[in-house]
Amino acid sequence: MMSFFHAIGRWVITAIEEMGQLLILLVSALVWACRPPWRIRAIIKQMEFVGVHSLFVTVLTGGFTGGVFTLQSFYGFSQFGAESMVGPTVALAMTRELGPVLTSLMVTGRAGSAMAAELGTMRVTEQIDALYVMAANPVKYLVVPRLIASVIMLPILTGISNFVGVVGGYLVGVKLLGINSGLFLGKTTEMVTMGDLGNGLIKAAVFGVILALVGCYKGFFTKGGAEGVGRATTEAVVLSSVMILVSDYMMTAIMF
């Protein structure tokens, strides 16, 4: 019985330590981000990696999410003769929740895991230690560009996902299910506000901080050689996804 409580205690202590280290890394990255020189070329390279290379999976996810949500909404609303609410329901769901969350989860699986693997490999091969020897701060050179790039590109990718999701919902609703086009677009523009879109983009920026911070943290503190790199990559994806979902609930409760 005592071993059970010991295990719970160890898990709580480990979780608290990790959250503290994450916070310290975030503060350190913010401090170094405000100090010149600013590595613009490295930031642009990471923006290409996080954003441009994630564009296809973002479009694919957004389009099919909007389409399938339209199908489900239509079958539900048609029972009450409220087919006109399909358009705004899909648009609100995409802009408020599905766009930011699903885009962030997909980018986490693609880019966040790569950050952890890359920095983890640098750690086990002592490249990060070499930066310290050369009096170059690894947080400045490795974490800051990835963090800035993620904060910039996640809202852009989310905006693209929102647009593609609404277009996918329109095509399914109007062309496949026979909803009146004017009714679909009119209700959507009437009920969806800039506040809905803006709050979704704010969520995406926060999710960008989470996935970049967790990915860099897990890679930065990797131990155990090649096996440790694999473990850090898996933990980065799992922890980022959980934190994104939890923070999504908290921000939704505050914003809406």
Image: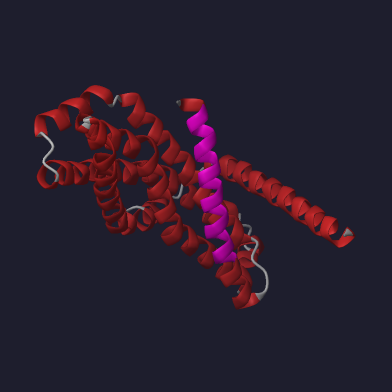
Please identify the residue farthest to the right as the structure is shown.
Answer: 2
In percent of the image, x 33 and y 46: which residue is there?
157
Q: Is residue 63 visible?
A: yes
In the figure, 240 relative to 100: above or below? below
- Is 248 on the left-hand or right-hand side of 189? right
- Is 213 on the left-hand or right-hand side of 162? right
- The magenta span reads 232-253
In percent of the image, x 28 and y 38: which residue is there?
90
Quarter of the image holding residue 93? Answer: top left
Magenta highlight on residue 244:
yes
In the figure, 29 relative to 236: above or below? above
Q: Of 22 and 122, which appears nearest the observer?
A: 22
- In the image, residue 153 lies at what x, y percent? 37, 46
In percent of the image, x 17 and y 46: which residue is there?
172
The quadrant the C terminus occupies is: top left
- In the image, residue 209 lies at what x, y percent? 50, 44
In percent of the image, x 40 and y 55: which residue is there?
106
- In the image, residue 68 lies at what x, y percent? 27, 49
Q: Of 10 and 125, which appears nearest the observer?
A: 10
